[in-house]
Image (spheres, helix red, strand yellow):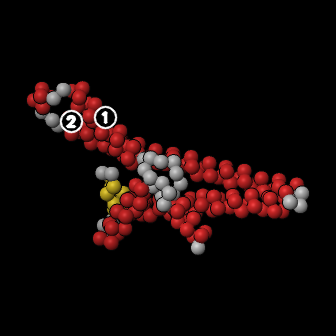
Amino acid sequence: ATLLLLIVLMFIGGAAGSTAGGIKVNSVGVLAAAVLSAVKGRPHVVAFWREIPIFVVMRALTVVVLALLLVSGANLATPVLIGRAIDEGIGPRRLGVIFVVVGWLVGLALARALFTFLQGYLAERASQGVAYDLRDALFERIERLSFSYYDRVQTGQLVTRLTNDVEQSRRFAS
């Protein structure tokens, strides 16, 4: 029961923008939207002003769950390996066991580092895609505004507000 509780807590571990492990809040939101779209028979999910095909969301979910299982397994294996090094290596003074356990610990640390990097990279890639789409849509809208609008509004203030809003949306999406 304790092991199951630890696994569940690792899965729900992170919030948007954090570096904690676990499914991000935004990922859960997109997953919920995908389930809702599938129930309604829609072929796509609308998330962050983008239409995402359901098969893409499900493929991404598969990768996320697989990565989470591997990272959770690595996190749970670390104390077990340290216990083995103490019980079978340090106690009986068997240097070979200690070297094997240290090798496994280094391998697990490298795997966690790789998955952490990939998580950050993919989150940033997705957030930059959202920001690009938002900037593109805003530019199209601004081009259609009348000249009288620009006479009433300060251009610098408009650009500042748009830049700020796009950046906040990008941070939320990452």
Q: Are marks 1 and 2 in contact (CB under 8 Å)?
A: no
Q: Is label 2 in a helix, a strand or a loop? A: helix
Q: Position of residue 71 (x, y in %)?
A: 60, 58
Q: Which residue sits at x=39%, y=43%?
A: 171
Farthest residue, direction left: 148
Q: Which residue sits at x=32%, y=66%?
A: 37
Farthest residue, direction right: 93
Res. 97 image quadrant: bottom right
Above/below status of 47 relative to 17: below
> In the image, what residue type sits under mark 2?
Ile
Q: Which residue sits at x=21%, y=39%?
A: 141
> In the image, what residue type sits under mark 1?
Thr
Q: Which residue sits at x=37%, y=43%?
A: 170
> Can residue 90 be seen in the rendering of this structure?
yes
Q: Position of residue 101 (x, y in %)?
A: 78, 56
Above/below status of 111 relative to 83: above
Of 30 and 72, nearer the camera is: 72
Q: Name the side, left or right, on which 69 lies relative to 108.
A: left
Res. 92 image quadrant: bottom right
Q: Quadrant of the N terminus?
A: bottom right
Res. 125 image quadrant: top left
Marks 1 and 2, the one that precedes in the sequence:
2
Of 81 and 129, nearer the camera is: 81
Q: Name the side, left or right, on which 174 lies relative to 63.
A: left
Find the distance from the CA under tag 1 to the CA under tag 2.
13 Å
According to the image, label 1 marks what residue? Answer: 163
According to the image, label 2 marks what residue? Answer: 142
Q: Position of residue 132 (x, y in %)?
A: 35, 41
Q: Is label 1 in a helix, a strand or a loop? A: helix
Q: Position of residue 107 (x, y in %)?
A: 71, 53
Disc 1 crowd, CA 10 A, few/some/many (<14, 14-19, 20+): some
